[in-house]
Protein backbone atom coordinates (compact mmCIF):
# COMPACT_ATOMS: atom_id res chain seq x y z
CA UNK A 1 0.00 0.00 0.00
CA UNK A 2 1.42 3.37 -0.97
CA UNK A 3 1.41 6.48 1.18
CA UNK A 4 -2.10 7.99 1.08
CA UNK A 5 -2.88 11.56 0.05
CA UNK A 6 -4.50 13.60 2.83
CA UNK A 7 -6.08 17.05 2.46
CA UNK A 8 -8.62 19.44 3.98
CA UNK A 9 -7.47 18.87 7.56
CA UNK A 10 -9.76 20.62 10.05
CA UNK A 11 -8.98 20.56 13.78
CA UNK A 12 -11.41 21.20 16.63
CA UNK A 13 -10.02 21.50 20.16
CA UNK A 14 -12.06 19.32 22.52
CA UNK A 15 -9.89 19.65 25.62
CA UNK A 16 -6.71 21.41 26.67
CA UNK A 17 -7.02 20.54 30.35
CA UNK A 18 -4.08 18.18 30.89
CA UNK A 19 -2.87 17.73 27.32
CA UNK A 20 -4.56 18.44 23.95
CA UNK A 21 -7.46 16.38 22.66
CA UNK A 22 -8.56 17.31 19.16
CA UNK A 23 -11.30 16.16 16.81
CA UNK A 24 -9.75 16.05 13.34
CA UNK A 25 -11.75 15.86 10.11
CA UNK A 26 -9.85 15.18 6.89
CA UNK A 27 -10.14 13.81 3.38
CA UNK A 28 -8.03 10.78 2.48
CA UNK A 29 -7.54 9.13 -0.88
CA UNK A 30 -8.36 5.43 -0.56
CA UNK A 31 -8.47 2.40 -2.87
CA UNK A 32 -8.86 3.25 -6.52
CA UNK A 33 -8.16 6.95 -5.99
CA UNK A 34 -11.54 7.67 -4.40
CA UNK A 35 -11.62 10.46 -1.77
CA UNK A 36 -13.24 9.71 1.59
CA UNK A 37 -13.97 12.08 4.49
CA UNK A 38 -13.02 10.74 7.95
CA UNK A 39 -13.19 12.03 11.52
CA UNK A 40 -10.89 10.90 14.32
CA UNK A 41 -9.82 12.12 17.75
CA UNK A 42 -6.14 12.54 18.55
CA UNK A 43 -4.62 13.01 21.99
CA UNK A 44 -1.37 15.00 21.94
CA UNK A 45 0.66 14.70 25.13
CA UNK A 46 4.04 15.24 23.50
CA UNK A 47 6.77 12.71 22.85
CA UNK A 48 8.48 10.69 25.56
CA UNK A 49 11.38 8.49 26.52
CA UNK A 50 11.71 5.31 28.57
CA UNK A 51 14.68 3.39 29.94
CA UNK A 52 15.46 0.01 31.45
CA UNK A 53 18.34 0.03 33.93
CA UNK A 54 20.25 -3.24 34.27
CA UNK A 55 23.22 -4.50 36.31
CA UNK A 56 25.35 -7.22 34.70
CA UNK A 57 27.09 -8.28 37.93
CA UNK A 58 23.94 -8.64 40.02
CA UNK A 59 21.77 -9.66 37.04
CA UNK A 60 19.09 -7.19 38.14
CA UNK A 61 16.88 -4.52 36.62
CA UNK A 62 15.37 -1.38 38.11
CA UNK A 63 11.66 -0.82 37.57
CA UNK A 64 9.08 1.46 39.18
CA UNK A 65 5.59 0.95 40.59
CA UNK A 66 2.96 3.67 40.70
CA UNK A 67 -0.78 4.28 40.50
CA UNK A 68 -2.10 4.71 36.94
CA UNK A 69 -5.70 5.94 36.82
CA UNK A 70 -6.49 4.72 33.26
CA UNK A 71 -5.58 1.14 34.27
CA UNK A 72 -7.75 1.42 37.38
CA UNK A 73 -10.70 2.64 35.30
CA UNK A 74 -10.15 -0.29 32.92
CA UNK A 75 -10.30 -3.00 35.58
CA UNK A 76 -6.84 -3.05 37.20
CA UNK A 77 -8.21 -3.43 40.76
CA UNK A 78 -5.30 -1.70 42.52
CA UNK A 79 -4.43 0.73 39.74
CA UNK A 80 -0.76 0.01 40.43
CA UNK A 81 1.48 -0.67 37.46
CA UNK A 82 5.08 -1.91 37.30
CA UNK A 83 6.95 0.03 34.62
CA UNK A 84 10.29 1.04 33.20
CA UNK A 85 11.21 4.61 34.12
CA UNK A 86 9.74 7.09 31.62
CA UNK A 87 8.84 10.71 31.06
CA UNK A 88 7.79 13.33 28.55
CA UNK A 89 10.48 15.16 26.60
CA UNK A 90 9.10 18.64 27.33
CA UNK A 91 11.82 20.85 25.80
CA UNK A 92 14.64 18.30 26.21
CA UNK A 93 16.10 15.95 23.65
CA UNK A 94 15.35 12.29 24.35
CA UNK A 95 18.73 11.46 25.92
CA UNK A 96 18.75 14.47 28.27
CA UNK A 97 15.15 13.74 29.22
CA UNK A 98 15.73 10.12 30.12
CA UNK A 99 18.84 10.89 32.18
CA UNK A 100 16.83 13.45 34.19
CA UNK A 101 13.82 11.14 34.56
CA UNK A 102 15.98 8.20 35.64
CA UNK A 103 17.57 10.24 38.41
CA UNK A 104 14.24 11.72 39.58
CA UNK A 105 12.35 8.43 39.51
CA UNK A 106 14.98 5.81 40.41
CA UNK A 107 17.68 7.83 42.14
CA UNK A 108 20.43 6.67 39.75
CA UNK A 109 22.64 9.19 37.91
CA UNK A 110 23.47 7.35 34.70
CA UNK A 111 26.77 7.65 32.87
CA UNK A 112 25.99 5.97 29.57
CA UNK A 113 22.60 5.47 27.99
CA UNK A 114 22.03 3.55 24.77
CA UNK A 115 19.09 4.28 22.48
CA UNK A 116 17.69 1.03 21.12
CA UNK A 117 14.60 2.06 19.09
CA UNK A 118 11.55 4.33 18.79
CA UNK A 119 7.87 3.33 18.67
CA UNK A 120 4.37 4.77 18.51
CA UNK A 121 2.62 3.09 21.43
CA UNK A 122 -1.04 3.74 20.60
CA UNK A 123 -1.12 5.21 17.08
CA UNK A 124 -4.89 4.89 16.70
CA UNK A 125 -5.48 7.77 19.12
CA UNK A 126 -2.26 9.10 20.68
CA UNK A 127 0.38 11.15 18.83
CA UNK A 128 3.28 10.25 21.17
CA UNK A 129 6.52 8.83 19.76
CA UNK A 130 8.43 7.01 22.52
CA UNK A 131 12.25 6.78 22.52
CA UNK A 132 13.52 3.55 24.14
CA UNK A 133 16.83 3.35 26.03
CA UNK A 134 18.79 0.90 28.15
CA UNK A 135 21.61 1.70 30.57
CA UNK A 136 23.88 -0.21 32.86
CA UNK A 137 23.77 0.93 36.49
CA UNK A 138 25.90 0.29 39.57
CA UNK A 139 25.22 0.89 43.26
CA UNK A 140 27.79 3.74 43.25
CA UNK A 141 25.54 5.69 40.82
CA UNK A 142 22.75 5.97 43.42
CA UNK A 143 22.38 9.65 44.40
CA UNK A 144 18.97 9.54 46.13
CA UNK A 145 16.07 7.24 46.92
CA UNK A 146 14.22 8.37 43.78
CA UNK A 147 10.46 8.32 43.90
CA UNK A 148 9.68 11.16 41.52
CA UNK A 149 9.02 14.86 41.91
CA UNK A 150 6.63 15.94 44.67
CA UNK A 151 5.40 19.00 42.72
CA UNK A 152 4.30 16.66 39.93
CA UNK A 153 2.41 14.51 42.46
CA UNK A 154 4.61 11.52 41.68
CA UNK A 155 4.58 8.75 44.27
CA UNK A 156 6.89 6.20 42.71
CA UNK A 157 8.20 3.05 44.37
CA UNK A 158 11.60 1.91 43.08
CA UNK A 159 12.00 -1.84 42.52
CA UNK A 160 15.31 -3.60 42.02
CA UNK A 161 14.46 -7.08 40.78
CA UNK A 162 16.43 -10.09 39.59
CA UNK A 163 16.11 -10.07 35.80
CA UNK A 164 14.74 -13.62 35.76
CA UNK A 165 12.06 -12.59 38.27
CA UNK A 166 11.03 -9.65 36.08
CA UNK A 167 10.71 -11.99 33.09
CA UNK A 168 8.62 -14.41 35.17
CA UNK A 169 6.41 -11.53 36.37
CA UNK A 170 5.88 -10.53 32.75
CA UNK A 171 4.94 -14.12 31.82
CA UNK A 172 2.45 -14.29 34.73
CA UNK A 173 0.83 -10.99 33.74
CA UNK A 174 2.14 -9.05 36.75
CA UNK A 175 4.02 -6.70 34.41
CA UNK A 176 1.50 -5.45 31.83
CA UNK A 177 2.96 -2.16 30.66
CA UNK A 178 3.77 -2.27 26.95
CA UNK A 179 6.98 -0.22 27.02
CA UNK A 180 8.33 -2.30 29.91
CA UNK A 181 7.53 -5.58 28.19
CA UNK A 182 9.28 -4.36 25.03
CA UNK A 183 12.41 -3.35 26.95
CA UNK A 184 12.53 -6.59 28.99
CA UNK A 185 12.22 -8.60 25.79
CA UNK A 186 14.91 -6.48 24.12
CA UNK A 187 17.28 -7.02 27.05
CA UNK A 188 16.50 -10.74 27.09
CA UNK A 189 17.21 -11.22 23.37
CA UNK A 190 20.34 -9.05 23.52
CA UNK A 191 21.83 -11.42 26.12
CA UNK A 192 23.42 -8.58 28.09
CA UNK A 193 22.50 -10.37 31.34
Image (cartoon, rainbow, N blue to C red):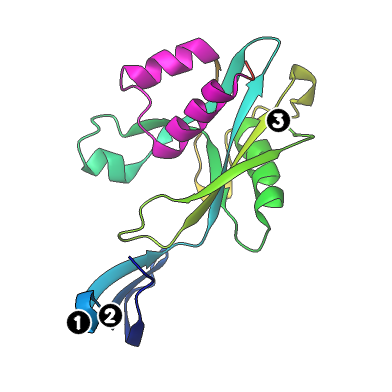
- Taking the image as shown, residue 172 lies to the left or right of residue 34, namely right
Marks 3 and 2, the one that precedes in the sequence: 2
Marks 1 and 2, the one that precedes in the sequence: 2
Report, in whole angstroms, how far the alpha carbon at label 1 lies from the one at label 3.
Answer: 51 Å
* Classed neighbour count for the residue bearing mark 3: other residues with Cα under 10 Å, few (<14), some (14–19), many (≥20): many
Secondary structure under tag 3 reads loop
Residue drawn at 48 percent across, 50 percent down = 119
Residue bearing the label numbered 3: 108
3 and 2 marks in contact (CB < 8 Å):
no
Which residue is the extreme one toward the front? 32
Q: In this view, does 69 lie above or below 159?
A: below
Residue bearing the label numbered 1: 36
Report, in whole angstroms, how far the alpha carbon at label 3 lies from the one at label 2.
Answer: 47 Å
Q: Main secondary structure of the magenta part?
A: helix
Q: Quadrant of the C terminus?
A: top right
Regarding residue 157, the answer to whether it shows in the image is no
Q: How many marks?
A: 3
Give the magenta range.
Answer: 163-191
Residue drawn at 57 percent across, 45 percent down = 117
Question: What is the quadrant of residue 177 in the picture?
Answer: top left
Residue bearing the label numbered 2: 28
Amino acid sequence: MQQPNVKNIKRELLSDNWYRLEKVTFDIQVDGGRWESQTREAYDRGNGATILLYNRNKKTVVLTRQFRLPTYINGNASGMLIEACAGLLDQDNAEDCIRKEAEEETGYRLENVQKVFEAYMSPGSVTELLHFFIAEYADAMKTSSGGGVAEEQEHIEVLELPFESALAMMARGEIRDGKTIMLLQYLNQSQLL
